[in-house]
Amino acid sequence: MKARSAILFGSALAALVVGALASTHVTAADKVDPAADIKAFQNFFFQKFPNVKHEDFANGPYSMNEDMKRQWQEKEEFPPYEFALDAGKEMFATPFKNGKTYADCFPDGGIGIRQNYPYFDEKEGKVVTLELALNRCREANGEAPYSYVKDEMASLTAYMAYTSRGKLMDIKIPDDPRALAAFENGKRYFYTRRGQMNFSCASCHVQSPGERIRAEVLAPALGILNAMPIYRSEWSSMGTTSRRFVTCNSQTRAVPLEPQSDEYRDVEYFLSYVANGLPISGPGARP
Amino acid sequence: MFMLAMLAGLAVSPARAQSAVAEGQKLAFDRGKGNCLTCHVIQGGDLPGTIGPALKDIKSKYPDRNELFAILFDETKRNPQTMMPPFGRNRILTEQEINAIVDFLQTL
């Protein structure tokens, strides 16, 4: 950003969206209103980036920068996540020791369903993410759970995302006070500043998308999970949603939470719901 | 204490001032300290980010060093929405370190 006026304008807009979200919070103190939130949230990004096609917000930093987008499109010819995709496909088809498969744990045999995760489980009273559902499937079938942050978990979610490419994010918030509370809690976490640096998730992904932080272009919060999991050259490996949340917290000197802790599940619920209508684009590749 | 630190910053001798400038630049560029390049273009620094304005002509813009000290100590006082970390309030930098960086900023 060059001019100070542009900075002030940017933070004024951010104040607006925060204000808009906060005021829905205030006017409806006893009623959380996700429908109003999603509208305010999406309009903020559509207005801030009028030249970005709406479905492009599912491509993280590449939606923000033509140069990067070109490099990425070239990379897509030989996608660096292909090894994970192949591994995931094979793992998905391989029966557990008891003869069952992942397909038995999911609706539609697990194919083309990424856009419905996370969902609110009314029996449990909590948000269930795809990563969590995969490990629960393993444990229900007598297999040890995988690490949430990499390798096998990234391969499985990469394959499940791939079979869902182009489907529109479709997260439901049932009319259940616990579901509304989970949404609200995720939203609160997302906008709360923390750590020595005093950043919230929104500082980087609402206030500054498209700006460079050192050499990295910041992804917009809208559609930020649609491409998960991702291959990052910087990691030389794949990473899941859990890995990215932990990394963002620890890189900004905030204390990261446990992967799949209630709060991270709620943040994922909030971010996925406000991306409703944007296509699944995972797995993704990042610089 | 805030005032004392600023006065201490003012009272340095020319030789010490020069070493403070060099020290200030080091602190500003150090990723574990100021890491100002994360967000600001600064002459002499590599891989700057674009979140904040380029830091140049600082002395003409902020002739009063107290104002610069305050921006580094806690910019949320001026702008509650700012992304700039409150280096002093959150003890990322000591007041002495902030003063050295202010010396460096005044040479830009």
Image (tube, coloured by chain):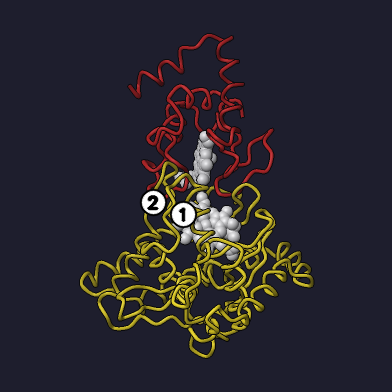
Chain colours: A yellow, B red
User: Residue drawn at (47%, 69%), measured in percent from left and top?
Assistant: A44
Q: Which mark is residue A11?
A: none
Asked if the residue at tag 1 contacts the one at tag 2, i.e. Cβ–Cβ closer than 8 Å, the answer is yes
* Quadrant location, the C terminus of chain A: bottom right
x and y percent of residue B3 in the render? 35, 22
Amino acid beneath label 2: Arg
State the image coordinates of residue B59 (x, y, percent, origin top left).
55, 28
Q: Check the image and report above or below for A199 versus A179.
A: above
Toward which corner of the image does residue A79 lie, by quadrant?
A: bottom right
Mark 1: secondary structure: helix
Q: Residues within 10 Å of mark 2 (few under 14, many from 20)?
A: some
Residue at figure coordinates x 70%, y 75% from the top left? A86
Please determine if labels 2 and 1 lie on a single subunit. Answer: yes
Look at label 1 and name its amino acid.
Answer: Ser
The residue pinned by badge 2 equals: A193
Q: Is residue A204 visible?
A: no
Q: Is residue A209 above or below residue B65?
A: below
* Residue hosting label 1: A203
Q: Is residue B31 left or right of A13 when viewed as pictured?
A: right
Is residue A80 visible to the viewer in this orientation of the structure? yes
The total number of labels drawn is 2
Q: Earlier in the sequence, mark 2 or mark 1?
A: 2
Q: Quadrant of residue B7?
A: top left
Q: Nearer the viewer, residue A46 or A152?
A: A152
Q: Chain of mark 1?
A: A
Q: Quick one: label 1, few (<14), some, or many (20+) residues within 10 Å? A: many
Point 59% across, 83% down: residue: A164
Residue beneath the point at 79% across and 72% down? A77
Of helix, strand and loop, which one carries label 2? Answer: loop
